[in-house]
Amino acid sequence: MSYIYKRRPNYYETDMMGIVHHSNYIRYFEEARIAYMRSFGCDVLEMEKLGVIIPNVDAYAKYIIPVKFGEDVDIKVGLTTFNGTRMEYTFTVYRQDGSIAATGHTMHCFVKSDFRPVSLKKALPEHYTKLLEKLEKPEQ
Amino acid sequence: MSYIYKRRPNYYETDMMGIVHHSNYIRYFEEARIAYMRSFGCDVLEMEKLGVIIPNVDAYAKYIIPVKFGEDVDIKVGLTTFNGTRMEYTFTVYRQDGSIAATGHTMHCFVKSDFRPVSLKKALPEHYTKLLEKLEKPEQ
Amino acid sequence: MSYIYKRRPNYYETDMMGIVHHSNYIRYFEEARIAYMRSFGCDVLEMEKLGVIIPNVDAYAKYIIPVKFGEDVDIKVGLTTFNGTRMEYTFTVYRQDGSIAATGHTMHCFVKSDFRPVSLKKALPEHYTKLLEKLEKPEQ
Amino acid sequence: MSYIYKRRPNYYETDMMGIVHHSNYIRYFEEARIAYMRSFGCDVLEMEKLGVIIPNVDAYAKYIIPVKFGEDVDIKVGLTTFNGTRMEYTFTVYRQDGSIAATGHTMHCFVKSDFRPVSLKKALPEHYTKLLEKLEKPEQ
């Protein structure tokens, strides 16, 4: 049920340590999540136009092996929590040799443009169903 | 008529060359321009709420001496063109020894939220007057 | 024992939701940590020049109230873990009305330029002592 | 002789105007230039490892039509100046309907790790030749 998002780090994403700055992983997670959601019919732009905005509730990244410029990464993303009010994505950033560069997760909620909570099931029932189908089961 | 905006470069703004990445100067220019405009009563947030948005028409930066983390800069900003339809700001980035790290300029226009042009003189006459007063004269 | 880092969000840090993009808080945390460390004699640039680099082991942010452009924040930072091998900083982002916009924490380790671990106590004993003095006690 | 670099703008690259922030085009230009250089055997990482660093001398972007999230762009990049000491790339950012969103150019020089100028012809003669072959002729 997971999805792989391929990413080539950019020169401007490196820092004076010579590695991808840690803040960029939070951005990569967003890219991977949005690409994944789009892949199964939950386009965040379309959802915004339909009145549902999806801000972050939290974001976490654990850095295991620094990634350098010139090293592509594969970001595996899965939907690990979803209850109609909140959803959590879990990420694993792989280097090309299969080793894990980083892991992380981000929690999201569903709000209207004024940031008041909205029930996704009522507001966008088709998107609700698509998300429910993608929810990873504990045993998987 | 000009204004000095002080800035301490951030660690995440450096790149693997060990210097502030060149793209960040375009961001520093925006910070300096917005702080300057605010200093003489042209707050861009207030102007947006009044219906006038100020996108960039262009942006230019010339890099003379690289700036490293730990080196603070003073950014001198002045309004060098203004005719009610467009305005241009000119920037000089000084290092603490007085040498010039970079120069640049950014041109802006005035639009509504749908990006259609708006006459600042008609839409916000008080802001128009304040900007006109700050326009640098050629002989200065 | 904590420190307050004041920050004015920049226009380019907002996103199309009209709020400061969540990834920027991870950057604010770095700014606050580096300013705090500098305030008590642990300048990261000086430490790097002495051979000790301080990468992130992890980073977490919890978003409570969105921050908009025009709203300044006060970031309270404290050293909540330190054992010579790792250190953790804890952050609270306050809005001007005293409400909490976000919280978070970042864990760091000490390495040489080749990213191999180094004992701070042996490599930089004076910095080790300064950090130990700043470690927040559970009862505080 | 030119090259097309495809780019999907990221959510975090938008600003509160609802468009891609203008500073990101300077970053897109870097991505496009580095991808183009890599395509003809001038990998900037390899060149850095061989002792030649390629900082920006200047950067310019002209913004014609704002790009929104969800709109992919094609960035055409060509090498428009090259004399062994400096090189300039020229960019055109196309929207999917063929209209031009932005144009720009960036000038670069060749330096050693201490930022002293280096002759590319002497330091990296093979790369020098490859670049010369890609230089666009005025009549093209």
Image: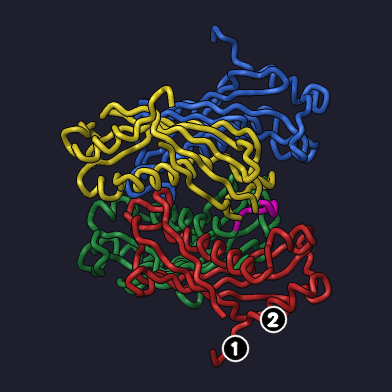
Chain colours: A yellow, B green, C blue, D red
Disc 2 marks a residue whose amino acid type is Leu
In the rendered image, residue D81 lying in the magenta stretch gets the answer: no
Magenta-tinted stretch: B16-21
- Of residues B76 and B106, which is closer to you in this image? B106
Answer with the quarter of the image where residue A54 lies.
Answer: top left
Q: Which of C64 and C135 is in front in this view?
A: C64
* Residue A58 rendering spot, x and y as whole percentages: 41, 30
**Circle 1 is placed at which residue position?**
D137
Pointer 2 residue:
D132
The quadrant the C terminus of chain D occupies is bottom right
What residue sits 16% from the left and 34% below the top?
A: A122
Q: Which chain carries label 1?
A: D
Q: Which percent across, then down, holds residue C98?
A: 37, 26
Q: Is residue C95 visible?
A: no
Q: Which mark is residue B27?
A: none
Q: Is residue C119 left or right of residue D29?
A: right
